Image (tube, grey):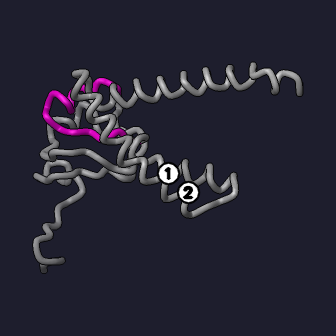
Amino acid sequence: MEAAPGVEIVAPHDILEVKCDVLAPCALGGIVNDDTIDRFRCKIIAGAANNQLLEDRHGIELTQRGILYAPDYVINAGGLMNVYLELERYSQKRAYRLIRNIFTNTLRIFRFAEESGLSTSEAADRVAVERMHEIARLKVCYNNFPSRAKRR
């Protein structure tokens, strides 16, 4: 019995070996590991599961194998953005604006990885660390701003 035209049903243990454009791990972390990495027949790994790489080195191995990896914490940022907005005064318009940035940020990571010779996971980590440093610098500047210092 055919489920739908063009759809092939495979057993769960065979799913990683299916030739496809995009593999989207959406449940279990650590799906990219020493036991699975040779089995992938996809061009891209982009899913909603957290911590898809069992170890950082697996992101480098994906790059070496020509598989584009969209780091989970980059493409899944929408959930955290929405929680942040719920703590503020929620605005659907603002939520959509922030969420649209996920695409732009993902492309930025891909470009940075290609230009710097890094894997996309390494590039995403570097961008994240730099953003944290920027926030820390801004926080220091803000806290040392003369008008704030007087209020303390």
Does 57 lie within the magenta span? Answer: yes
Query: Horizontal placement of 137 versus 89: left or right?
Result: left
Give the farthest residue toward the bottom. 1
Q: Position of residue 91 (x, y in %)?
A: 61, 61
Q: Position of residue 82 (x, y in %)?
A: 56, 54
- Mark 2 closeness class: few <14, some 14–19, many ≥20 residues within 10 Å: few
Q: Visible in this render: residue 69?
A: yes
Residue at 34% from the left image edge and 42% from the top image edge: 106
Does 112 lie within the magenta span? Answer: no
Residue at 15% from the left image edge and 41% from the top image edge: 39
Q: Secondary structure at mark 2?
A: helix
Q: Is residue 74 above or below residue 100?
A: above
Q: Position of residue 84 (x, y in %)?
A: 62, 49
The dot on residue 98 is 1
Q: Visible in this render: residue 31?
A: no
Q: Position of residue 33 (x, y in %)?
A: 28, 33
Instruction: Find out whether the residues at labels 2 and 1 contact each other: C-beta distance under 8 Å.
Output: yes
Which kind of residue does numbered mark 1 sit on? Leu
Q: Secondary structure at mark 1?
A: helix
Query: Horizontal placement of 47 versus 20: left or right?
Result: right
State the image quarter where residue 127 is shown.
top left
Residue at 36% from the left image edge and 45% from the top image edge: 104
Tell me how far mark 2 sits from mark 1, CA to CA.
6 Å
> Which region is colored magenta?
55-72
- Mark 1 closeness class: few <14, some 14–19, many ≥20 residues within 10 Å: some
State the image quarter where residue 116 is shown.
top left
Which one is in front, 89 or 56? 89
The dot on residue 94 is 2
Which kind of residue does numbered mark 2 sit on? Arg
Residue at 27% from the left image edge and 28% from the top image edge: 113
